[in-house]
Amino acid sequence: MDPANPASFNHRTELLSTGRRYHFVDQLPANYNPKTTKTIVCVHGFPDLWYGWRYQIKPWVDLGYRVVVPDKLGYGGTDKPEDAIHYTSKRISDDIAALMDLLQIEKAVIIGHDWGCFMVSRFALWHPDKLLALVLLSVPFVPPSKEYISLEQMVERFPNWGYQLYFREKSTNAEIERHLSKFFKLIYRRRKNKDSPLSKWTLPGGLKEVLESSPVHNDTGFLTQQEFDYYVSQFDKNMNGPLNYYRTTQHRFQEEQEDGVLPAPGADLPVLLIVGKDDPTANKGALEVTKKLIPQVEIELIDGVGHWVMVECKEHITESIPRFLQNALATTSNVHTKL
């Protein structure tokens, strides 16, 4: 398992009971025992792949975990339905559950980053019986809403979400594909001075303007040139699926009005939230909401780190999560033993 070589991981592609075909990496530890080995399922965000976890997979396998890392629907080697209705959090949660069933995993540690973080937080609401622990990276918990809030209304409240209005438009697919190399240099860029023209890309039309007018530079940011080339090759003519997640606002609201969805993860579920202090995704108010709704949550704030925590501070993520799990799962095991 060499992070510089995607082919060095154990790749599988399987048809799930939900009818969707998923590509995923499935790494077993040397001492694998289906009855006792605990599994970590990692769910990536936008625009990412299973490859976003390349620095964590081997160290966690070496610690004795089975590590399962899918390409989410619409990404990489996984099915890519055309319509946005296929990309709701309930459907993705059902896919994760079906993947676990396929692999005969009753319960797992579920970890998500970015959009994957939102999806795994919803997984905890739809499939609470399938979790050993929940780890959220970069995105605090957002509860189901009792009334519909449009994307326009959300952008009014949080102006730095303005780029989501651009991503929502179908025309954005071709525009980003036309400037794919520049797009990934923007997304994975290192933090810039606030006066940089890149700082306006979060505005509704800002990213389009930056893509079409800013000069191309050679800096691949947090990615090596080899990693950058791999990402670009995987997203070539393939932006509809990834962008479809931004087109599900109303669909997600409607499915969360169904009976059976929990308002928040259960009080007995160990939860860890890790956030880079320089990541605008997680403001103080959002962290307070998470603490209120999930009182048992452990929160780690990392100085000098932005959104791409699995790469920016890979050693911290690689070491901190198993440390949390060692304590959390031991406590959970003791509780069940007493019962």
Image (spheres, rainbow, N blue to C red):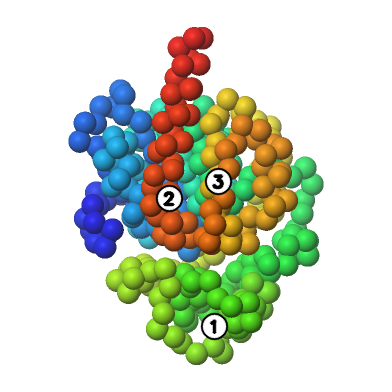
Q: Nearer the viewer, mark 2 or mark 1?
A: 2
Residue 269 left/right relative to 67: right
Taking 128 as reference, is 224 above or below it? below
Could you tell me residue 76's position as x and y percent? 38, 60
- Can you tell which mark lies on residue 134? none
List the residue tagged with mark 1.
211
Residue at 54% in and 57% down: 303
Between 235 and 132, the one nearer to me in the picture = 132
Instruction: Specify which label sits upstream in the sequence, 1 or 3.
Output: 1
Q: Nearer the viewer, residue 192 or 39?
A: 192
The amino acid pointed to by label 2 is His
As measured in the structure, the alpha-carbon distance from the residue carrying label 2 to the one carrying label 1 is: 33 Å
User: What amino acid is at disc 1?
Assistant: Leu
Q: Which residue is mark 2?
A: 316
Question: First in sequence: mark 2 or mark 1?
Answer: 1
* Label 2 CA crowd tier, 10 Å (few <14, some 14–19, many 20+): some
Farthest top residue in view: 339
Kindly identify the amino acid type of the residue bearing the numbered disc 3: Glu
Position of residue 11 measured from the top left corner of the image (x, y, whole percent): 27, 51
